[in-house]
Every structure is written in structure tokens, then in C-alpha cells.
Amino acid sequence: MMRHSLLHRLGTGLLVLWAAFTLSFVLLQVLPGDAVLIKFQNPDLGLSPQQIAEMRVAYGADSPLWQQYLHTLLAMLRGDFGFSVQAGVPVSAQIADNLPGTLRLALCGFLLAVLLAFTLAALSRQPALRALRSLLQSAPALFISIPTFWLGIALIQVFSFQLRWIPVINPSPWQGLLLPIVAVAVPISAPLAQILLRSIDDVSSQPFVAVARAKGASESRVLWRHVLRNAMLPVLTIAGLLLGELIAGALITETVFGLGGLGQLTQQAVNNQDVAVLQAIVMISALAFVVINLLVDLLMPLFDPRLKSVAGGTL
């Protein structure tokens, strides 16, 4: 049953990837403009109409859409993302150059969001900070509604121009990452804190927690050994969904802060109608979403052994 469940999840993930590929292919094809014409119709290149037509044939731009669809799909199954019309290099090379920066920003932002969430949840349980608990009830909607680009600009205005703590020109590598990390972490930290706090409250009212207290366990032991482990299940679920949102926020944040990564690559591809690059970025984002949620599904039985029994067919 466990193997069957894993195969089912893998099959669902492959279906999601195929749907993402098909939908992105159709939407990119109906966009106005043509990447080949944008590049090769430049008068400075001095190409004749016949030469431009030959370029279109070489890039497959004049092939029927169904042939382009099958060719692109089969190529991606082999790990071949094609060539960038504008850069004239394999798209995989561009992805390899820009992906590490985006991953660094997304992972650091996620770790900071988790740290902020646990800190807010812990502080709100203190009797002297009950007002923080009330604030967390409304903060998630406020934080998520803040546009990432606006938050990034506000952080630059405050910490770079007014306080002058972080230089705008020639910052060190970590100085240049600090504000972008905060910009992507803050919008998802409040929802995580709210879910964690509610889950802790729900678990704390369960009978087994009362039994642990009756046996003389300290509050810290009850929290860390009994409550927190069981409270992590809904947090893991929402974290997997929010991490996908964080990756999208990272792409926007890179553009705001001028960081090298998939964000700037996406902006350049949109400006130049570079369909191959855009298709590759969509598929990488979809793959990240599928892998993250698969990992969440695999981690959940570690926090709740009952899920192993369900997967194994004993319940």
C-alpha cells in the first residue's frame, strides 16, 4: 500500500507537469509577437527576407503547432529545453547560470519565514503578549496582500536611503541578499505563524497532553515532546503551498533588487518573446512545486505515525 500510494503521488505529479506544459505552450503561442522576427528583422543585421525565412525554418517557427508541441514535449523529456533565440545559446545553460541565485534567495527566505513564524507563535503564547495573538488573527491577510515589489521598494527606501544601513551601490554579497530575503519571507511568515499557533492550541487541548501534565512533565517538555510534533502536520501542508508562492515572489524580488537569477532571465525573455526560455522557467517552477509537495507527503508520516498505518492499510 505504501508503494501504491507513492506511485499514485508520482503519477499525479507527472499529470500536473504535463498540464503545466500544455497550458503554458498554448498561452505562449497565442502571445503577440515573434522572437525570431524581433531579433533578425533588426536593420542593423542586414538580413534579407529569404535569410530571415531560413532562420524561421531553422528554429521551427513555421512548423504546424502540433509538430512544435510534440517536438518540444519530447525534447523536454530528454532534458533538452531548446535554444534561446535572443542569446543564441542552449536554454539549459542559461538556467544553470541563473538557477543557483534564485534557489539561494528562496531557501534563505523560507528559512527566515519559518524562524519568524516560530518566534511569533512562541511569543504570542506568553501571557504578557496576548495582544500579539490578536494581531496574528489579522496579520496573515495583511501580509499576503502586500505586493512583493512594493515591499522590496519600501525596504530599499527605509534601510538604504533613509537609514543608510545597506548600501545600494556595490554591496557585499550578503548585504545584497539581506533585503531581498526579508522581502520574500515577510509575506508568508504571518500565515505560517497563525497556522502553527492554532495547531498548538488544538493539540494542547487533547487528552494525551493533559495526561503528560498529570504525570509531572514540565511545560517545556510537554510543548516540545508532545504538542509541537503533533502540531506540525497542518504547518507542513501549508508550508508546501506557501513555498511555491515564495518562489514566485523570489522571481519578482530579483527584478526589483537587480539580482541575477531566474527573475531577470524571465523579464528578458518576456521583453524578447523568447518562448523557449519562458517555457523552461514555467516547467522548472512546476517541477519545484511537485517535488516540494511530494516531499511534504513523505515527511508527514514522520510526525504522525498513524499516517504510516493508513498508508499500510492497517486502519
Image: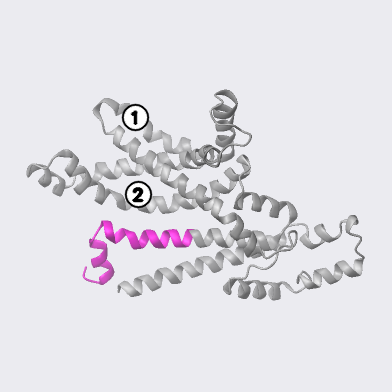
Residue 281 % position (x, y)? 60, 59
Q: Main secondary structure of the magenta part?
A: helix
Looking at the image, which is closer to me, 100 or 66?
Answer: 100
**Which residue corresponds to the image point at 15% horizontal and 46% vertical from the top-left?**
209
Alpha carbon distance from label 1 to label 2 = 19 Å
Looking at the image, which is closer to me, 143 or 154?
Answer: 154
Looking at the image, which is closer to me, 47 or 33?
Answer: 47
Residue 296 % position (x, y)? 37, 58
Q: Secondary structure at mark 1?
A: helix
Q: Is residue 257 rendered to the left or right of residue 46?
A: left
Residue 124 % position (x, y)? 30, 33
Label pair 1/2, CB-CB below 8 angstroms: no
The stretch in magenta equals: 289-315
The numbered mark at residue 235 is: 2
Q: Is residue 134 rendered to the left or right of residue 216?
A: right
Residue at the top extreme?
Answer: 162
- The tag earlier along the polypeptide, 1 or 2, is 1
Residue pointed to by mark 1? 132
